[in-house]
Amino acid sequence: MNIRSFQTKQILFLVSIYIHLSPMENTILQINQFLKKHSWCDFEIINLEGYQLKGQLVITGKTGFSDFDIQITFEEVFFMQCLYEWKTDTTKEAFSIPDIEEQKEINLKYGIETGYYLFRIHAEDIEAPMYISAKNCKFELLN
């Protein structure tokens, strides 16, 4: 098998993975792929707005010493258990959607309503995961 054939098979495999993912899983996968390209990333909450009951949470991440490189927006946040700022180990999966059992446990513990995604964040040097429950998650690369 030549290298071009191997690369084509890898691309087709990755495309098949994207097809079987939900839109939120695909978003989380893309965020993690961005993070894995960098040695480190520090995150912080830059905006938590919500004049209504459920608002928007915006976090940004820096992979260098200057401007922010990525902005992640959680829309219609129902619940959050999260630090104001944290460091991320980019060699590991930093953002994920918990398995169904973990989702059920957190949803029952905190009374999260049906129709919200549960997002798990793993911070470096912190044992317990952080959680955000929201209707949607999107991201933007800033640089």
Image (spheres, helix red, strand yellow):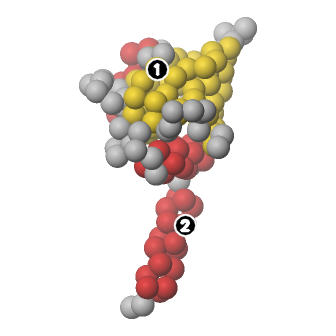
Above or below, 34 against 106 in this view is below
Q: How many marks?
A: 2
Q: Position of residue 45 (x, y in %)?
A: 55, 20
Q: Residue furthest front?
A: 65
The numbered disc on residue 140 is none
Residue 83's x, y, as percent?
44, 17
- Give 3 or 101, whichever is nearer the viewer: 3
Specify the amino acid type for callout 1: Glu
* Rendering coords of residue 8 (x, y %): 51, 80
Residue 65 vs 3, above or below: the answer is above
Q: Residue at x 72, y 10 (%)?
A: 52
Residue 85 got which mark?
A: 1
Q: Quadrant of the C terminus?
A: top right
Q: Secondary structure at mark 2?
A: helix
Label 1: few (<14), some or many (≥20) within 10 Å?
Answer: some
Where in the figure is residue 107, as x and y percent of width and height? Answer: 44, 22
Q: CA distance from mark 2 to mark 1?
A: 34 Å
Q: Assess whether mark 1 and mark 2 are in contact (beta carbons under 8 angstroms).
A: no
Asked if one can make out residue 47 in the rendered structure from this viewpoint, the answer is: yes
Which residue is located at x 47 percent, y 86 percent?
Answer: 5
Residue type at numbered disc 2: Val
The quarter of the displayed image where residue 141 is located: top right
Name, please, the residue furthest toward the right. Answer: 51
Nearer to us in this view, 120 or 112: 120
Report the mark closest to the observer, 2 or 1.
1
The residue at 66%/40% (across/down) is: 142
- Judged from the image, the secondary structure of the residue bearing numbered disc 1 is strand
Q: Which residue is mark 2?
A: 15
Please indicate whether residue 85 sits to the left or right of residue 53 in the image.
left
